[in-house]
Amino acid sequence: MFRNQYDHDVSIWSPQGRLYQIEYAMEAVKQGAATVAVKSKTHVVLCALKRAPSELSAHQKKIMFIDDHIGVSIAGLASDARILW
């Protein structure tokens, strides 16, 4: 996608009625890998699919420890989730 004058803010509509920032976010999710969480009465399992490594890409953690009761898994691009931690 090419940048234009209508993609600077999520609240700016293009003349065609498109929100480019939303479309960019949807493309980023398509680029990411799936994450799944399963909870039982005593355990929680958090899994993240890791794509085959590319020669040009660096390792990105998909599951982060927040504290003893909270963990986070990223479904989109790791750079989009950095603001969370």
Image (cartoon, grey):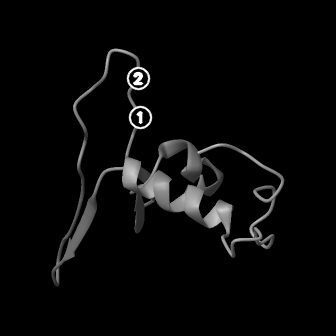
Foreground mark, 1 or 2? Answer: 2
Q: Residue furthest top?
A: 55
The residue that appears at 37% across and 46% down in the rendered structure is 62
Tag 1 near tag 2, CB within 8 Å: yes
Q: Amino acid at mark 2?
A: Ser
The quadrant of the image that shows the N terminus is top right
Camera-nearest residue between 32 and 42: 32
Question: What label does residue 57 carry, if any?
Answer: 2
Image vertical order of residue 40 relative to residue 72, above or below: below
Question: What percent of the width, then of the height, locates residue 32?
Answer: 38, 49
Q: Residues within 10 Å of mark 1 (few under 14, many from 20)?
A: few
Compared to residue 1, the image places residue 27 above or below, namely below
At which x and y percent is residue 48? Answer: 26, 52
Image quadrant assignment for residue 71: bottom left
Please indicate, yes or no, whether residue 71 appears anywhere in the rendered image. yes
Viewer-nearest residue: 83 or 80: 80
Residue 63 in sight from this viewpoint: no
Give left or right: position of 73 versus 28: left
Relative to 74, say whether 19 is above or below. Answer: below
Q: Residue at x 57, y 62 (%)?
A: 23
At x 56%, y 42%, the residue is 79
Disc 1 designates what residue?
60
Along the viewing direction, whichever of 47 and 45 lies nearer the viewer:
47
Q: Residue furthest front?
A: 16
What's under tag 1, amino acid-wise? Gln
Q: What crowding class fits label 2: few (fewer than 14 Cα within 10 Å), some (14-19), or many (20 or more)?
A: few
